[in-house]
Amino acid sequence: MARVLIVEARFYTHLNDLLLEGARAAIEEAGHSHETITVPGALELPGAIGLAAESGRYDAYVAIGVVIRGETYHFEIVAGESARGLMALSMDGLAIGNGILTTENEAQALTRAKPTEKDKGGEAAKAALAMLALRERFA
Ligand SMILES: Nc1c(NC[C@H](O)[C@H](O)[C@H](O)CO)[nH]c(=O)[nH]c1=O
Ligand SMILES: CC(=O)[C@@H](O)COP(=O)(O)O
């Protein structure tokens, strides 16, 4: 049984709850265990996963968050840098699924967060487990 850490950036509570529902369902359906920690925003997700990875307690990681464009360039920073940070950790060999929504508006985020619609939380969890299986194949 794999130990999966879900790291959520709780910036939009109702959207995160939907993403978490999908991610947890996917992990449980695959027969693995999970726990969840919370950080303030998407920019903190890569750092939190990096810290957790140093503990050696987890086999895979799912990043959950929602970044919705506002009035300034900050969207590009938050969306781009959180993704870049996760990619860097993945290239270091961590099994990570990216469930950070980056959307123009809340309606786009909602349809992607709902497990009954695009289920991006579940998709990210499945991606993390796929990368874990791949790592075990090459071990
Ligand atoms: N605007 C959004 C943010 N911004 C906050 C940053 O992620 C970060 O927590 C802050 O800059 C302090 O370091 N975060 C999101 O997750 N979603 C947003 O839409
Ligand atoms: C993605 C963001 O950082 C955004 O929500 C912040 O909004 P604004 O650009 O209007 O400050």
Image (cartoon, rainbow, N blue to C red):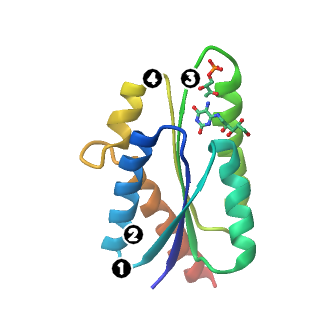
Q: Is mark 1 within 8 Å of ligand 1?
A: no
Q: Is mark 3 within 8 Å of ligand 2?
A: yes
Residue at image mark 1 = 31
Q: Where does the image place residue 98, in percent across and percent down from the top left?
A: 54, 52
Number of other residues with Cα within 10 Å of mark 4, as a class: few under 14, some 14 to 19, many 20 or more? few
Q: Can you say which quadrant of the picture contains the N terminus?
A: bottom left
Q: Inspect the image, locate mark 2, and give the three-letter code of the amino acid beneath it.
A: Ile
Q: Tell me the SS state at disc 3.
A: loop
- Residue 13 lies in quadrant: top left
Q: Quadrant of ligand 2?
A: top right
Give the alpha-carbon distance from disc 2 to disc 1, as whole Å.
6 Å
Residue at 36% from the left image edge and 47% from the top image edge = 18
Q: Inspect the image, locate mark 3, and give the three-letter code of the amino acid beneath it.
A: Arg
Q: Inspect the image, locate mark 4, and give the three-letter code of the amino acid beneath it.
A: Asn
Q: Tell me the SS state at disc 1.
A: loop
Badge 3 vs badge 1, beta-carbon distance below 8 Å:
no
Residue at image mark 3 = 69
Number of other residues with Cα within 10 Å of mark 1, as a class: few under 14, some 14 to 19, many 20 or more? few
Q: Earlier in the sequence, mark 3 or mark 4?
A: 3
Badge 3 vs badge 4, beta-carbon distance below 8 Å:
yes
Residue at 42% from the left image edge and 63% from the top image edge = 126
Q: Left or right: where does residue 39 sit relative to residue 124?
A: right
Residue at image mark 2 = 27
Q: Earlier in the sequence, mark 2 or mark 4?
A: 2
> Measured along the vertical axis of the image, is residue 95 above or below residue 69?
below
Q: Earlier in the sequence, mark 3 or mark 1?
A: 1
Q: Where does the image place residue 58, in percent across and percent down from the top left?
A: 60, 77
Label annotation for residue 105? 4
Q: Is mark 2 within 8 Å of ligand 1?
A: no
Q: Left or right: where does residue 93 sit relative to residue 115?
A: right
Give the alpha-carbon distance from disc 3 to disc 4, as whole Å.
7 Å
Of residues 89 and 63, the one drawn nearer to the viewer in this rendering:
63
